[in-house]
Every structure is written in C-alpha cells, then in structure tokens.
Image (tube, rainbow, N blue to C red):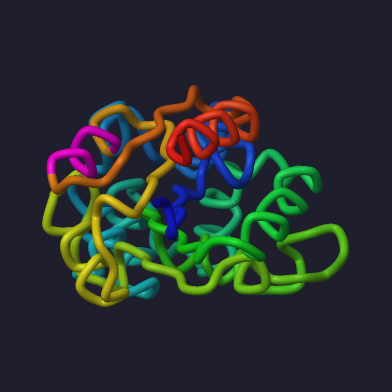
Amino acid sequence: MIRNLWFDMGGVVFRQDSEEAFARFRAAGIDPERYMGAYGQKEFFLDLESGRIDREEFCRRMARAAGREEVELDQARHCWLGFVRDVPTERLRHLLELRREYRLCLLSNTNPFAMEFARSDRFSTDGRPITDYFDRLFCSYEMGICKPDPEFFRRVLAAEGVRAEETVFVDDSLKNVRAAEEVGIRGLHVETNAEWWGPLTELLQESEL
C-alpha cells in the first residue's frame, strides 16, 4: 500500500522557465550553459546547491565569473527566480487533497534563493508558503547531497522512517526517478511542467488492486 508521496519542486510543483532564468544570468554576465544543463549544476552553482557555499559566497563567485566588482544578493535572487514561471493553484489544491490521505514530502535540488521565495507568503496566490502543502521538505543544500545520488533517497527514507515500497516519487528528471527506483521506491516520471494529477491518480489506483 502506498502511504508516502514525494515530489520534486521545479517543473513539478511550480512551472519552470529555464529560458527566462538563463536570460537573466546572461544579462548579469554569466554564461548559464557553462554552469547549468541537462545533467545538473556545475562548479560554484553545484557548490551552492549542495550546501558547500552560502548565498554570500555564491555572489562573490558570480561576480568573479562575470568580471564584475560585486553581485548583490537581490541581483542573484532575481536571476534564480527566473526559473519560476508560476505556481498553478490547481496543483496546490491537489497537494492539499493528497495530504489528507498520504504523507507528502518535497525532495528538491535547490538553493537558499529559491527556498527563501518558496517558504514565503509570495509562493502562492493565497499567501501560503510551500510548507503549508508538505509535511516535510528535503532540500539538497540543507542535506549536503543532490539527486540523483541514491544516498539522497536513502537518507530521506531513514529520516522519515518509512519503507521504500510504500513510497512514490514524482520528478521531471528521468535520472532522478531511476535513482529512486534503484533503492526500491516507485517512480513516476513526468515531462517538465506537465500535469501529473492524472498519471499519479492512475498509479495510486493500480497500487490498490
């Protein structure tokens, strides 16, 4: 029986706009293709996402990479939040519905800039932070590890004290889904920004047969 539902954030909870984010980084003097791609973050971008550096150090390294004297926190935040196209109200409603029956966790490769927004009342149109929709958040920069490392999922299983076979993980990255399946979790891969309610409902119904 499925008892636990785990969700990725970008491209799953909120609709993602990589083109806008890349444009903002380019305007700041950064070549985004050098640091971000289909296989994850690189260099100091990865250091931020994995918790090896903080926001201030990221700004210092961003300034050096851009050949600038300084990059302020607000400037870096503006670049990162370019990834957030919108947060569909319907998806948030579905999460609240699911939370009545399942334990919901967020598992995200993310950073302090993104989570400052997500944990604020600016996250949803009704002024509710992301913590109102999940029982617990697992963020890469706080855990010191990123998906698709299978250890990421093992740590969440241990922290939650739950069984892999009672858990479904929803992500728009196939490599992350496969890593979850490697440790026995049932994966559901969805295309970036695609609606997941129908496929997830079908999977949950099948699991009850």
Q: What residue do we see at 33% from left, 36% from top?
A: 187
Residue 166 position within the rendered picture, expressed as x and y whole percent measured from the top left = 33, 54
Residue 29 position within the rendered picture, expressed as x and y whole percent measured from the top left = 43, 40
**Position of 64 compared to 191: left or right?**
left
Q: Quadrant of residue 99?
A: bottom right
Image vertical order of residue 39 relative to residue 151, above or below? above
**Position of 162 compared to 28: left or right?**
left
Q: What residue do we see at 26% from left, 32% from top?
A: 34
Q: Which residue occupies the extreme right position in the image? A: 126
Q: What residue do we see at 43% from left, 32% from top?
A: 172
Q: How many marks?
A: 0
Q: Quadrant of residue 121?
A: bottom right
The chief SS type of the magenta part is helix
Q: Which residue occupies the extreme front position in the image? A: 209
**Position of 21 compared to 1: left or right?**
right
In the image shown, does 67 or 149 lie closer to the viewer?
Answer: 149
> Does residue 180 belong to the magenta stretch?
yes
Q: What residue do we see at 71% from left, 60% from top?
A: 96
What is the magenta range? 177-182
Residue 74 position within the rendered picture, expressed as x and y whole percent measured from the top left = 59, 66
In the image shown, does 39 or 68 lie closer to the viewer?
Answer: 39
> Does residue 4 belong to the magenta stretch?
no
Residue 80 position within the rendered picture, expressed as x and y whole percent measured from the top left = 52, 51
**Position of 105 compared to 47: left or right?**
right
